[in-house]
Image (cartoon, helix red, strand yellow):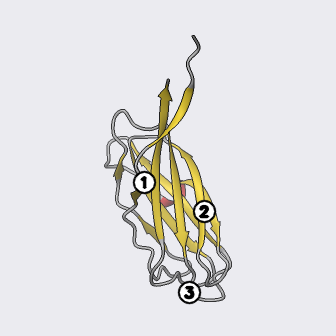
Amino acid sequence: MAEDIRQNFGTDTAVTITLANLADGSDATSNAIDLGSPGPFALSLEAKLDGSAAGNTGLVEIYAQWSNENTDFSDSGNDLLIGAVQMNGTTAVIKVFAASVHARYVKFRAENNSGAALAASGNTLRYVPVSVDQV
């Protein structure tokens, strides 16, 4: 009998990163996340971002910094671009990204190029590990 392979979604977890009032042209990097061993094949990353001014119409780019041993992470110029969130002024936006896993440890970096600072609240990153379930 043939077996089916399905995605298995893990626990939705907040990323520890300071996005409140993140100035235009600035970036913020999260704490390191240990994905475990064995680890997932991918991550579902959700960004909820809120602008503070009508000028927040540019992009907030989300990057991953990978490490095999939780010591050396990629430099900002060598981060892996996960995707970009198109801001729309002062209205909150939500975008979900899929990211393949490259190593056991990861940090996320948000680079605000939206045209103005992010709002003082309402800005979060969350992730869900995605693994394989064979039934």
| Residue found 59% across the figure and 54% down from its top | 97
Do residues under tags 2 and 3 come within 8 Å of each other at their CB atoms?
no
Q: Nearer the viewer, mark 2 or mark 3?
A: 2
Residue that protrudes farthest toward the bottom in the picture: 53
Q: Which of marks 1 and 2 is nearer the N terminus?
A: 1
| Residue 91, numbered label | none
| Residue found 46% across the figure and 50% down from its top | 128
Q: Which of marks 3 and 1 is in front?
A: 1
Residue type of the residue flagged with mark 1: Asp
Mark 3, residues whose alpha carbon is within 10 Å: few (<14), some, or many (≥20)? Answer: some
Q: What element carries label 1?
A: loop
Q: Name the residue under label 1.
A: 12
Q: Where is residue 71 in the image (x, y as percent from the top left)?
A: 31, 49
Would you place residue 56 above or below residue 101 in this image? below
Q: Where is residue 55 in the image (x, y as percent from the top left)?
A: 66, 86
Residue that protrudes farthest toward the front in the picture: 1
